[in-house]
Image (cartoon, helix red, strand yellow):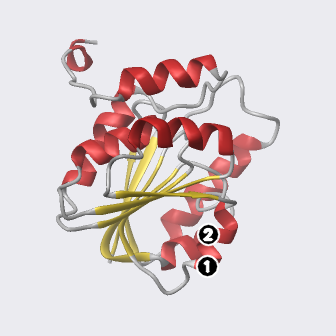
Amino acid sequence: MLWTQNIKKPMKAEAIAADAEAAGFKMSCDLETGSLLRTLAGSCERGRLLELGTGAGLSTSWILDGMDAASSLLTVELDESLHNIARTHLGSDSRVQFFTMDGTVFIKEFKGHTFDFIFADTWPGKYNMLDETLALLSPGGLYIIDDLIPVSTWSEGHAGKVEHLIQYLDSREDLILTKINWSTGLIIAAKK
């Protein structure tokens, strides 16, 4: 597509993608989602950002690429080998802190903290601990999720979980939603 031909990738993106592929990790964000994350991160001046599900760090590189020098990012991943790929490429950036732990534990431990931007790309924060995660979102903050358009690799029953998630987010009076039928399917929610 013409629109994606000239998207400038973050400096470390190619190396991260290569290491992720070598590790057999096939769940990194695509170009469109990465570009959107960069733009949204750029809207959070002096922001506190949270990524649940670092993976190998490709989406992390896009988020960091959009952040200003005064912003900070906390990124959480359960798989230590994947997190080590992200650390190898992005660990020298003082704006990012890596938490290798279960996202559910992280969400519980950070109760009472707030973030201006939350990208939930794993089960905790998206399908589990959703209310607790949204409680971490500052008023005016952005909550972003992807992977909402059905694909053949979804397990049986996953489509129902996605449908329930979307209906629940729609029902919340404290969120303003935009559903995007693009890339892997995204929702961006702003907290009132």
Tag 1 secondary structure: helix
Amino acid of disc 2 = Phe
Amino acid of disc 1 = Glu
The image's mark for residue 109 is 1
| Of the pair 156 and 96, the residue shown nearer to us | 96
| Of the pair 92 and 62, the residue shown nearer to us | 92
Identify the image quadrant of residue 56. Answer: top right
The image's mark for residue 118 is none
Seen in the picture, residue 92 relative to 132 is either above or below; the reply is above
The image's mark for residue 106 is 2
In the picture, measured across the screen, residue 40 lies left or right of residue 125, that is left
Tag 2 secondary structure: helix
Q: Position of residue 15 (x, y in %)?
A: 42, 22
Q: Residue at x 58, y 65 (%)?
A: 168
Seen in the picture, residue 83 relative to 127 is either above or below; the reply is above
Identify the image quadrant of residue 24. Answer: top right
Q: Residue at x 17, y 56 (%)?
A: 68
In the picture, measured across the screen, residue 152 lies left or right of residue 42, that is right
Q: Position of residue 180 (x, y in %)?
A: 38, 42
Q: Position of residue 80 (x, y in %)?
A: 67, 45
Identify the image quadrant of residue 20. Answer: top right
